[in-house]
Image: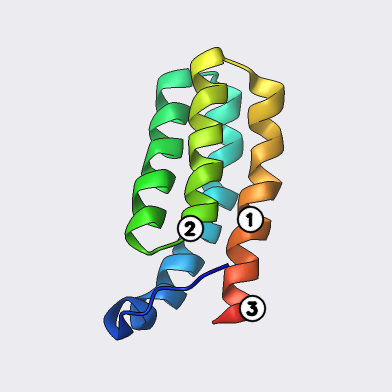
């Protein structure tokens, strides 16, 4: 995993990662339970965009994967993404 080189971005990264871990733990299961594919798609899109801004391309790819499952309304595959996301953010946290 490649971290951003910008010192300002690196300074913001720990809070960014902690916020996403918290958001996933709080919001993901209710999003799945609601079966609102548009909101789940938006969640994946936000992950993709914000992670790309922080140079976390690998996690952005998981966001894109989630967007696809939301579009397909593939709730089982979407449910598997939660652990994948949390683990990916936790691995960034270990590096920083």
Q: Can residue 59 be seen in this snapshot?
A: yes
Q: In percent of the image, x 56 and y 40: which residue is there?
A: 28
Q: In percent of the image, x 65 and y 43: which residue is there?
A: 82
Dot 1: few (<14), some (14–19), or many (≥20) neighbours within 10 Å? some
Q: Which residue is mark 3?
A: 94
Residue sitting at the far left: 8
Q: Quadrant of residue 29?
A: top right
Mark 2 vs mark 3: in front = 3
Labelled disc at residue 46: none
Q: Quadrant of residue 11?
A: bottom left
Q: Which residue is mark 2?
A: 20
Q: Is residue 68 above or below residue 66?
A: above
Element carrying mark 1 = helix
Dot 2: few (<14), some (14–19), or many (≥20) neighbours within 10 Å? some
Q: Position of residue 43 (x, y in %)?
A: 43, 37
Q: CA distance from mark 1 to mark 3?
A: 12 Å
- Sequence-first disc among 2 and 3: 2
Q: Position of residue 92 (x, y in %)?
A: 58, 70
Q: Is residue 84 above or below residue 34?
A: below
Q: Which residue is mark 1?
A: 86
Q: Is residue 41 above or below residue 12?
A: above
Q: Position of residue 58 (x, y in %)?
A: 54, 54
Element carrying mark 3 = helix
In the picture, which quadrant includes the C terminus? bottom right
Element carrying mark 2 = helix
- Sequence-first disc among 1 and 3: 1
Q: Can residue 23 be seen in this snapshot?
A: no
Mark 1 near mark 2, Cβ–Cβ under 8 Å? no
Q: In percent of the image, x 37 and y 64: which residue is there?
A: 54
- Sequence-first disc among 1 and 2: 2
């Amino acid at each position: 995993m490649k971290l951003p080189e910008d010192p300002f971005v690196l300074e913001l990264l720990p809070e960014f990662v902690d916020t996403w871990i918290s958001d996933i733990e709080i919001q993901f299961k209710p999003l799945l339970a609601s079966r609102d594919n548009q909101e789940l798609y938006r969640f994946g899109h936000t992950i993709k965009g914000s992670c790309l801004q922080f140079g976390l391309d690998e996690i952005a790819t998981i966001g894109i994967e989630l967007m696809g499952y939301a579009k397909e309304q593939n709730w089982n595959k979407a449910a598997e993404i939660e652990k994948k996301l949390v683990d990916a953010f936790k691995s960034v946290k270990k590096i920083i």
